[in-house]
Every structure is written in structure tokens, then in C-alpha cells.
Amino acid sequence: MELTGQSILGGRRSGGAGKGFQAFNPQTGEAIAPVYHSAVAAEVDEAVELASEAFASSSQLSGKARAAFLRRAADGFDAHREALAQRAHLETALPMPRLLGEVGRTSGQLRLFAGVVEEGSWVQARIDPALPDRQPLPRPDIRSMLRPLGPVAVFGASNFPLAFSVAGGDTASALAAGCPVVVKAHPAHPGTSELAGQILAEAVAAEGLHPGVFSLLFDAGIDVGAALVRHPLIRAVAFTGSLRAGRALMDLAAARPDPIPCFTEMSSGNPVFVLPGALRKGPAGLAATLFGSFTLGAGQFCTKPGIVLVPEAPEGQAFFDELKALVEKAAPFTLLTEGIAREYGRATETRAAEIPVAAQALAEAGPACMAGARLFAVCLEEFLAKPALADEIFGPNTLLVHCNSTQDFVRAAAALDGHLTATILGDEDDLVANRKLIQVLAEKAGRLIFNGMPTGVEVTHAIVHGGPYPATSDPRFTSVGSMAIYRFARPVCFQGFPEEMLPPELQDGNPLGIRRLRNGNIEAI
Amino acid sequence: MELTGQSILGGRRSGGAGKGFQAFNPQTGEAIAPVYHSAVAAEVDEAVELASEAFASSSQLSGKARAAFLRRAADGFDAHREALAQRAHLETALPMPRLLGEVGRTSGQLRLFAGVVEEGSWVQARIDPALPDRQPLPRPDIRSMLRPLGPVAVFGASNFPLAFSVAGGDTASALAAGCPVVVKAHPAHPGTSELAGQILAEAVAAEGLHPGVFSLLFDAGIDVGAALVRHPLIRAVAFTGSLRAGRALMDLAAARPDPIPCFTEMSSGNPVFVLPGALRKGPAGLAATLFGSFTLGAGQFCTKPGIVLVPEAPEGQAFFDELKALVEKAAPFTLLTEGIAREYGRATETRAAEIPVAAQALAEAGPACMAGARLFAVCLEEFLAKPALADEIFGPNTLLVHCNSTQDFVRAAAALDGHLTATILGDEDDLVANRKLIQVLAEKAGRLIFNGMPTGVEVTHAIVHGGPYPATSDPRFTSVGSMAIYRFARPVCFQGFPEEMLPPELQDGNPLGIRRLRNGNIEAI
């Protein structure tokens, strides 16, 4: 596959008029060819108009046809595994094994959604048959199912150049729902984005779908994204990124003449509560696991444990010492972009001016994207008094919060904002003794983890990657796992329609053999 | 039951400090005792703080316990059927049979949700068991289910003083989900609201629930509502009313430091497409049915057919003449409030200055709430050129849009904004000939109706009372029917938790016997 530097507008290449920009190799600081061109307003309009045109047919495609398209795209990712990972490695400095794994995650997600829409029950078909003899008035026949929302704007994320970018979970779930997608590529990995876009566009063409089903727009700045969210024909938005950018998109979506659903996954401290049993099991192992988690991907995971609460305990000092030692001897990390590295420096310096730095890796001269691990430490009272300490700092750092005892944990938990995850480490006796903590955390996070690390999000049917603000814009949805499709669908009800005019999902004979509710009860298949 | 004019703060009566106001009898213009007192800021805070306190226990109640509470409340409504309807009749001038029916609808809704939460499957439990042997890494055990959002602010609607007011569908679904509710009563029917609030508060007490589970606040103005939506402890909002007020609440919710879900059901023209078969069946009957629908409840239904598209047809003139005759001889209607009557006058005069009034009832001198039926008529081109003609005018009026042929219908449908309903009248041949129209309407409305009137919304499992903006704030939800509960719940995922620490809904043995998905497939019960 050849890189052109051009946007993809419904299968057609376009670009050259907009401002040029390039990717940079975070390891060397060198620009990477080719030059990309920011899309101009007319290109945004064309992409969205094509998407709107495509919706007329994409919304009517059978689940089987959508599955075939998603599987073809997945095959394309697997076929170009090496090329994708290599380009992503150049653009992000993330290690090759991780990136090869991420290609698999990307094709896996596409296949997961293919399975969901092929099986078909996800539409939540409900049938309340007519009651012609009901008094005082007959009840009409009422049936409903989920239908796609319309064209969706997806924003590529910096930290998952494949699995949450052009053909990542947002795109896969929106396409699966039957929504055309216009992606705004993240400017930090335009080459990876173009490769992914090409694979998707080829799958669209090969399956004979309307080319407007997928478009990819480049932009070094924020104009294209803002124009997408404001565009009258865009019906929903999906974004993964910073709180600042995510909130800006939320505000734009809410300020439209017709506000639209805008799912943004933004910021999470992913608190970890260390209970005595976990310390007893071995402070050194615990420190190593935690260090591995908060520096995984150079600390650039949405689920990085950024707040670790530890009670006074005999093993507490050993745990703390071990963690400090790991941080101090840590080799420097290469962050995704100079901008992220700059922000990491600024935010950690600000925090260091407020509270003690317990440990930090030796600074090294190096390219602008290099950053050292940092460990902050604070007591609970100070943590509670300074809410900004709970703010996420993207990069390889975490904050230890020293508590007097686990009695403080409920108070600490109650003071938290929304998070993607909350983790409890300990033994089963600890859990029994901390039921209230579990209850409070269930109000604060989308996923509670016992004796695991929050990094590493399984892509399954039960997973929730969501949570109350500021973790996301809407705690009722997830952006990972098969439930992510529900962000892009709405129920439509058919009242009094004759059998043959109903979608197959709602016909009496249940030709698709899907799970349905009849008068609220599951129907025998 | 005695009326006190006081707010109910978690079971306690409170009030007297705030500004006084009274209900008015729309038929006579006379004030109705007692005097009500607008809640002050401290009362709003107390109600919400009690709700937040109550959430700790209400969120943990079993489905059975919540069902018992909802059924007790339902019994209370049935027991006070006459008193409720009589007071509502005084305050709204809606006819007694309708109001007696509305009490039944209110208790019926409470029982519908009782059944849903008692059965328990609504929580959408999903289980993806651990895969300890998976390579390269084992998969942890992952389980998720829906949990309540937290305290919900509900706004009573003017046009359904019982079924969409203090203990209406919003309150019933929020309580069913496990959310405490703080209601802001509609000032047009405070007595009905207090009666309903008393019944709910008594049910809370009788079931031994935390009194903060339910509070009721009065206010003649907008301060209490705004304070509720802005309150940091409120987690969601439900509202039925005007576009102006609903949008204002949406904007308040979106502007919070932590935006929260805000479901507003606002404005809908409920277009009706008359196909040739419907005219052939009998223009006079069609005119009578339509007239009955757009003047039902004095035209104050959310689902009033406010736009009627009719093609040129031999029977078209007869239909038009009959409809005009019905409007001209219609007796005056009593609207809910002087404010609504004033707005009806203003809006119909504005429209009359723009386009022809095809027919209007003879004006009569009478109390300020009286209003005459009006029929507007316009050709399609003018309708398309003047988007304001699609705006809802609350009250007994509708707009006929003359089209050249059904060929124009798709163009008309494509130009529509979001609506709660869209109706097609005709025979089955008409449907076959108008598949594209059905497809376009399914993108515009939450409910498509064939050969029925949009007024009259069944409360069932499959019903959708929702739709794209401006019909509602979020097309992914419904405010009527059992699916309304999903507005107030969010998925929470438990990863790696031992069996005995999981909620019963997620335990392996499935002690509640609910429908669950295991690895995405329905589990055998």
C-alpha cells in the first residue's frame, strides 16, 4: 500500500489544498514522509454529504451483509499486519509487539461486531401483539427494534493508533449499527491512519457498498473536527482523548441547533485501593505489578492507575521503598508526541510544586518526546483538600495516597469523581470487610476490578469501558466491547403495520431467528 | 387527604417561606385553595441531599422490594381515584372520564415497572467467564449489569396531571431503576400534585424506605427547576413540556461542570400522510377521525397530529370540506392555563398572518382559557419554504398540506425534523407503493403508525415515545413504556470478583432466574 497524504472522501482521494503537515518519529524527532494535507471545508461537506447519501442504503443492509463487510475489513487488517505495525511504530514509538497485538485487537473488534450483527439479536426486538378484544378500546399491534442513528463522526485517538483510531472500536461499532462513518484522523499518526483508511475503503468497494459509508479526513488542527460535530447531517460523535478536547466537543454538540449524542471518553485516574491482604501477599511483587501497569505504553493508557491508596501496614514501607526504587532506576520513556511530552513536563512540574515527589527517574538528555517516570506521594487529608490531585496526568507517573487505615477508604472513594475503573487489591476477607467501599466505587466507575490491574481492557460482551463524567460524557454507554454498538442506535416502533411491511426482525415468523421479547417475555425460538 | 400547600421533603412537610401561588380553575378563572408556597433554595438543597442519602439504600434494594413499593403506591392511586380525578378536573378542566382513566394509567405504569423490576431481567446481566488457559494471557472473569444512576429530578407536565406528573412515567421508571426522585410539581395543578405526592410519600413510609427516596417541591416560577438541574448531587433529569423550557434545561444540564443525562420530551408535529386508499375508504369518516385526534384533550397531546399531508385525489375536496365543517361548528375548547391560551392565540395569529386559515370555530366571549379550533392549509411548496410551519402549536389546530401527488411525500418527509410519531393512512397497496416513504419516516420519528391516530400512546414493552430532536433531547430513549427505565441506569462491570461478592444478578447460580447473556449468548435458565 502506498501513502498519498490525501484524505479519502467516499473512496475518492482528495487533498492538496489544505495546509500541509507531517508525522514525527518520537524517537528521533524526524519528520516522516509523506506530507499530509488538512481537509478544507468543502472536503468536510463532501464527506458528510456522501455519508448521508450512503445512509439510505447502509441503514437497510442486512446484518449478514454488514458482517461480510466488517469481516472483509478485518481480513485486510490481518493481511497488512506488519505494514500497519511498522508504520505505527515509526509514528508512535510504541513497541512492535504491542502494535502487532493492536492490529489483532482491531481485526478482532471488527469480527466481534460482525458476529453481533450477523446473529442479529442486538436490535432488541420487542413485540406486543394487538389485543382486539381489550376493553374499553382494542390495543393495536406494537413492535419496536433498534435502528442506526445516521452518519457518525469518529475521532482517532493518539494512544491507540489502530484499535481506537480510524478502524477502531468506535468506527467498528458505528458501522456495525448501520451508520456511515467520517473519521477525523489523529495528526500524530497520519500514515497509520491512511493505511487503515485504505483497508476500510477497499472493503467498502469490494462489498459493493455505497462509497460514502466511510471517509477519512486529515487535519493538523481542530477545524475539521469542529466542522464535523457542527455539521447538520452528522447524527452522533465518538471521541477518545483529553478532557479538554472531549469537553469542547461535548459543548459543540450540545450547542447545535439540534443537539446530537456525543460520546467522549476522556479522563480517568483509575484509583487502586490496596487492602492489607494485598500487602501481606508480598509488597515487592505488588510494587512491580503496579509499576508495570502505570508505565505500560509509557503511562498513556486511559486505564492507567493514577491514584493508589495505601493504608498504614507493616508491609507498607517495603512496598513504598520498592516502588520508589523501580521508578528511580526506570529507563526513560518515549511519549507519543512532543506535545504530550511538553504537557507531561508541565503537569508533573505543577504537581511537584504542590506535593512531594517521592521518586523520579534520572533525567536524561534526549529527544523532546522523552520523559522520566515519577512517583508522587501525599497523605489522604491533603489529597482530599486538593481536588486537582485526582486529575489525570497522561504519562508514566502515579500518585500514592497514604491513608491511616482502610476506614479512610470509603471517605476517599466518596470524594472521587467519575472514573473508568476502580481497583481493589486484597484477599477475600478484605472484600467482605469492605462491602461499603465496593458499593461506593460502583457509583464512581464503570468497571470494578478485584486483584487485577486496570490496564488491559478485554473486548467482550460484558465489558464496560465507561463511567460518570469526567471519565466519559455519558455513563450509560461503553466504548469498548459489543455493547458499544448501543451508542449509535435508537428504537423505532411500528404500530399497526401488516406483517409483510415489517422489517424481518419484527415479523411474526421470526425469519432471522433472533431473541425477542413478546409482551415483555422472551419468545421461544 | 388534606391539602396543605407545602412541599414534601423526604416525608416531612415544609413551606411557607417561599412566594405564594394558587391554582386556577380554567373553566371559571377562579383561584383554588389552598395557597402553595414556592420552595426556597434551602428546601431544594435539603430534598436533594436527602435523595442522595437515600440512594445508598435505594440502590441496594432488591427488585422485589422495589416492586412492593411501586405496587403499594399504585394501590394508593386506585384507592384515591375519585379524589385525584376531581381535583385534577378542577385544576385542568380536562373531562372526568379522561382523568379517571389517567389515574388508572398512572397506577398501571407503576405496576408495569413493578413487574419489570420484580422479574429482574431488565438489568441486562452479561457474563463472560474467565479463560484461564487463554494464550498469551488468561482472560479474567467479566460480568456486568445495569445499576441506577442516582438522584433524578423530574418535572411534572401540564397536560398529563397524573400520568406524566408527580407519580407519572418518569417518576415510576426512575424509582423502579433504584433512583430517588425529586419532583418539581407543575404549578398549574399543585393540588393534584400534592395528592399524588402524599400517596407516594405514604408508600415510602409504609415500605420502610429511606424518606429521601421521594420529595416534591412546588414553585410558581423557574428557580426550583433550574436549581435542581444544576445541583451537584442530581444525576439525571426527566422533563415533558415545551421546546423552549426543555431546551433551557438541556442547556443547563450540558453547562454543568459535570454534564448529566437530561431527557426532555418537547415538541412534535406528528405528521400524518394521507394516501389514496384512506381517502377512498371514506373522506367524511377520515375527517371525523382526524378532527377527533387533533382536538383530543383540547389539542394538548404531545402526539397531536399537527401536520396532515394530503395528495390531489377525487375525494380530497370532500375530505377538506368535511374537515372545515367540523372545525367551524366546533364548540370552544378550554385550555389548561391562561398562559397556554395566550400562547395559542399568539401562535395561531402569527400563523394566520402567514398562510390562509381554512376554517375556524366561531369566536365566543368566555373565560381567558377558552380557545377555538383552527384549520390551516397550505401547499407543499410553501410548507417547505417556511420551516416554521412545522412548529407545533399546542392546542386544537392542525395544518393541512396539499400535495400534488404522493410522489411529493418523500420530499416532504425528508424535510422534516424529528417527531414523536409519523402516521400513514391508506390501504396495503399504498404501503407497498410507498416503501421509501416508510424508510424516510423511520429516520424522523420514534413511532410509525399505520391506520391509527398518533394520539393515545399504549404503555407497553415495545412502545417508543421518543424521537430525534426537537421531539426529545436524545433519540436513543423513550419516556413511555417499560424501556423508559433505561434512561436512569448505567452498566457497571465486575472483573475478577469472587462469586459471593457479586450481586445476585451476576452470580453463577443465577438465584434470581433472570435472562442473561453468557459469552454473548442467552443462557439456559
Image (spheres, coloured by chain):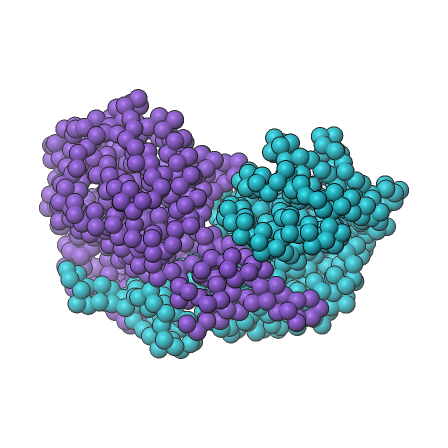
Chain colours: A purple, B cyan
In the rendered view, does B395 fall on the left or right side of A186? right
- In the rendered image, which quarter contains the N terminus of chain B? bottom right
Residue positioned 20% across, 55% down in the render: A290
- Residue B461 falls in which quadrant of the image? bottom right
Q: Nearer the viewer, residue A86 or B362?
A: B362
Position above or below: B412 against A445: above
Residue positioned 33% across, 64% down in the render: B520
Total residue callouts = 0
- In the rendered image, which quarter contains the C terminus of chain B? bottom left
Query: Is any part of residue B113 visible from this angle?
Result: no
In the rendered view, does A195 fall on the left or right side of B271? left
Query: Is any part of residue B380 visible from this angle?
Result: yes
Q: How far across and down, in percent of the image, does residue A519 sit?
A: 53, 69
Residue positioned 11% across, 43% down in the render: A331
- Residue A394 falls in which quadrant of the image? top left
Position above or below: B68 against A502: below
Residue positioned 70% across, 57% down in the render: B161
Q: How far across and down, in percent of the image, does residue B476 sit?
A: 48, 52
Q: How far across and down, in percent of the image, does residue B79 sit?
A: 71, 72
Q: Nearer the viewer, residue B311 or A325?
A: B311
- Residue A155 falls in which quadrant of the image? top left
In the rendered view, does A370 fall on the left or right side of A414? left
Q: How far across and down, in percent of the image, does residue A16 sit?
A: 27, 23
In the rendered view, does B46 fall on the left or right side of A314? right
Q: Nearer the viewer, residue A108 or B14?
A: A108
Q: Residue furthest front?
A: B314
